[in-house]
Image (tube, rainbow, N blue to C red):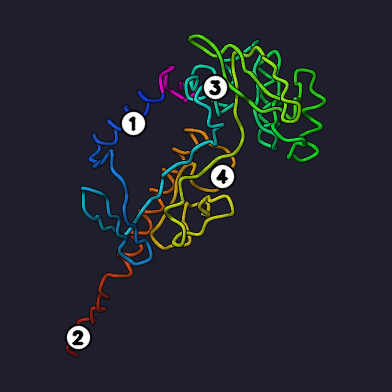
């Protein structure tokens, strides 16, 4: 659900993306869907992208915007309740859980920071972490402990999510005793990491230790003519608005790159000699 994008009424993510797609095509963009990139060569002046059933495409510029994927618990019931109580973005969906009891799954900085952030909306937040110790920095853990709306439960793992049409409760299990508890919750936010879709770029573009593409503020990577936008790059905030901003910057930077390249490739213009005048 998209409800906080400036100028857009509440809509589904699918409809919002389809609107963007129609608009891009109306401006002349060629869009290939349901395709897989089978080969990529970004090191030369001419970039080569091979797509199954579509052949090879060559261009002087490539913008990588393959996004990323939140880590999941891998539970069948998790898939069932995605968008029906289970979320991976507090900023996106927190407001939907005003005055409701929710669960946050995770034990790192992101989980505890988002739990504190969600106290603006939820009436109670139970943080469930599978390990004996939280991995968050002491300041993040202290802030969560001091918040009266937050309860910390560890070491507990999520067994399954339950409900009819929407999430209603979560079954958790103690990792040592095997004791199971059922917690009433209309929402669950899962913060156990994020996977950028960059594995296919290893060895060509410089990545950090989390697999995110390293780029400057103009979205330039370590390769000339290769730019990046969205959740696949190193960034703190992952929102539609920040991804759109990245795309704008990447497109403008790519345009500048092409213009500079054309100027450098253009043949030199000989300076005209002044006309001679008879004495």
| Separation (CA) of disc 3 from disc 1 | 25 Å
Horizontal arrangement in the rendering, residue 49 relative to residue 128 (left or right): left
- Secondary structure beneath dot 4 equals loop
**x and y percentages locating residue 112 in the rendered image:** 71, 31
| Separation (CA) of disc 3 from disc 2 | 83 Å
- Secondary structure beneath dot 3 equals strand
In the rendered image, which residue does mark 2 sit on?
276
Q: Which mark is residue 20?
A: 1
In the rendered image, which residue does mark 4 sit on?
235
Q: Residue at x 28, y 57 (%)?
A: 59
Magenta stretch, main secondary structure, is loop
Horizontal arrangement in the rendering, residue 9 relative to residue 237 (left or right): left
| Separation (CA) of disc 4 from disc 3 | 24 Å
Query: Is residue 9 one of those drawn in magenta?
Result: yes
Q: Are the residues at dot 4 and dot 2 in contact (C-beta closer than 8 Å)?
A: no
Front label number (3 vs 2): 3
* Range of residues picked out in magenta: 1-12
Query: Is residue 45 one of those drawn in magenta?
Result: no
In the rendered image, which residue does mark 3 sit on?
86
Q: Residue furthest left?
A: 278
* Residue 52 versus residue 69 in the image, above or below: below
For marks 4 and 1 on the same chain, the one whose residue lies earlier in the sequence: 1
Q: Are the residues at dot 3 and dot 2 in contact (C-beta closer than 8 Å)?
A: no
Q: Nearer the viewer, residue 172 or 242?
A: 172
Q: Residue at x 55, y 29 (%)?
A: 88
């Amino acid at each position: 659900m998209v409800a906080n994008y400036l100028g857009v009424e509440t809509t589904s993510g699918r409809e919002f993306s389809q609107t963007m797609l129609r608009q891009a095509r109306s401006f002349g963009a060629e869009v290939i869907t349901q395709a897989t990139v089978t080969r990529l060569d970004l090191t030369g002046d001419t970039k080569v992208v091979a797509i199954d059933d579509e052949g090879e495409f060559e261009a002087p510029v490539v913008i990588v915007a393959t996004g990323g994927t939140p880590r999941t618990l891998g539970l069948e019931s998790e898939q069932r309740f995605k968008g029906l109580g289970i979320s991976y973005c507090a900023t996106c969906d927190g407001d939907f859980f005003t005055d409701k009891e929710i669960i946050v799954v995770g034990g790192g900085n992101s989980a505890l920071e988002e739990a504190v952030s969600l106290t603006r909306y939820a009436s109670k937040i139970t943080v469930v972490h599978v390990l004996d110790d939280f991995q968050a920095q002491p300041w993040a853990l202290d802030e969560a402990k001091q918040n009266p709306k937050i309860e910390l439960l560890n070491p507990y793992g999520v067994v399954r999510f339950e409900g009819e049409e929407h999430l209603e409760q979560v079954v958790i299990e103690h990792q040592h005793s095997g004791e199971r508890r059922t917690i009433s919750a209309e929402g669950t936010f899962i913060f156990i990491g994020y996977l950028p879709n960059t594995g296919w770029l290893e060895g060509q573009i410089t990545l950090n230790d989390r697999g995110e593409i390293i780029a400057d503020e103009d979205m330039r990577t370590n390769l000339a003519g290769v730019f990046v936008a969205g959740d696949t790059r190193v960034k703190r905030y992952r929102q539609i608005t920040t991804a759109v901003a990245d795309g704008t910057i990447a497109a403008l930077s790519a345009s500048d790159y092409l213009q500079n390249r054309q100027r450098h490739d253009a043949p030199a213009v000989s300076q005209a000699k002044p006309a001679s005048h008879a004495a």
